[in-house]
Image (spheres, helix red, strand yellow):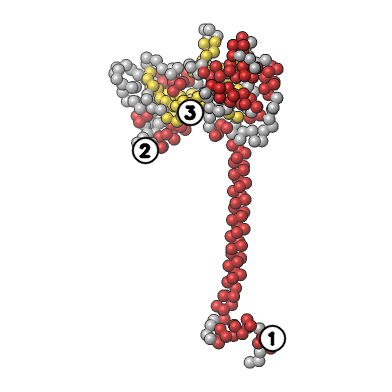
Amino acid sequence: MRRDAQEEDDPSYRERENEFNSGGDPLEMTDRNRRPKRFFRAVTALILTGSMFVLLLAGCQKQAEKAEDSSAAVEQNEAYVDQIRERGYLIVGCKMDVPDMGYYDKKTDSWSGLEVELAWKLAADIFQVSIEEAREADRVHFLGVTVADREEKLDQGEIDVMIATYTITEERKKRFAISDSYYTDYIGLMVRYSGENINSLGTSDIRSLADLDGKFIAVAKNSTTRKDMLNYIDTMNTLEVSPRFNEYSSYKAMYDALKKKEVDAMSVDVSILKGYVDSSTRILPDRFAGQHYGAAVKPENRVLLEHINNVIGQMQ
């Protein structure tokens, strides 16, 4: 067989011919020559795929960070504090039925509690006067709120700031601008007490959280109590209970349901339970899910938080 002179002078041709003459498979030979190219193509594809994944992940992370900040896409009202000063008073949403925190006495037409005092201190800071001068000039107008309507009243602008046993959560931070914590409480349980056994912590069949399997628990509407209790039960290997829950729009409604035996227990922050305990009820020793209270304002009014956090810092 005649071979072209150019083929004879081609080193790769002679190499293939030698392999063929030595018994090598021409198909294998050709495949080996292609392997380096295939390898480099595969590596390049992996690098490109990895780069695209990193960019996508970074984009998702930035979106998540924006979602966590309630003011990320909200135009700020930098003049809000000046507007409050021009009005002449601060409007504060407070609880009316939580002794030692936020309580309104109809007989004396007066407000009292830690959160009420925080409101007066905030007004004094905004108007640059003493607390006594703020009281004399009526620099705070209180508006009663409940666990069911406090967020709505803040959303609608009926109040400047909500100081109402409002637990700080990541979910709530996405909706409102929330201050540093000014108080920490824990969730507890209150049950009926017959008084038949003075050594009993509660009723004969409910002495702790472990006795709540199948029992009905009164919780406040729009609160974190149900979620916090179930999370606590899940993390405690010694607890095998599945309580049921009824939601109520006020603490008074929860208390009435307990007294009428519509529910077996009432669960809310201990500071709130203390305002309802009497000779016919008992607060059980269980404590779980620390609740850090913060003041909340609308996202666009974040400038007000500077004054709130300043006052909270002075209180601690």
x and y, in percent, of residue 213 in the image: 36, 31
Most extreme residue toward the bottom is 1
Per the model, the C-alpha gap separating discs 2 and 1 is: 83 Å
Residue under pointer 1: 6
Q: Residue at x 62, y 23 (%)?
A: 307
Mark 2 or mark 1: whose residue is earlier in sequence: 1
Which of the numbered marks, if any, corresponds to residue 234? none
x and y, in percent, of residue 242 in the image: 39, 34
Residue under pointer 2: 237
Label 2's element?
loop
Q: Residues within 10 Å of mark 3 (few under 14, many from 20)?
A: many
Say whether residue 56 is left or right of residue 227: right
Image quarter for residue 217?
top left
Mark 2 or mark 3: whose residue is earlier in sequence: 2
- Residue 10, above or below 264: below
- Residue 70, above or below 11: above
Circle 2: residue type: Asn
Mark 3 or mark 1: whose residue is earlier in sequence: 1
Residue under pointer 3: 291
Circle 3: residue type: Gln
- Residue 6, above or below 48: below
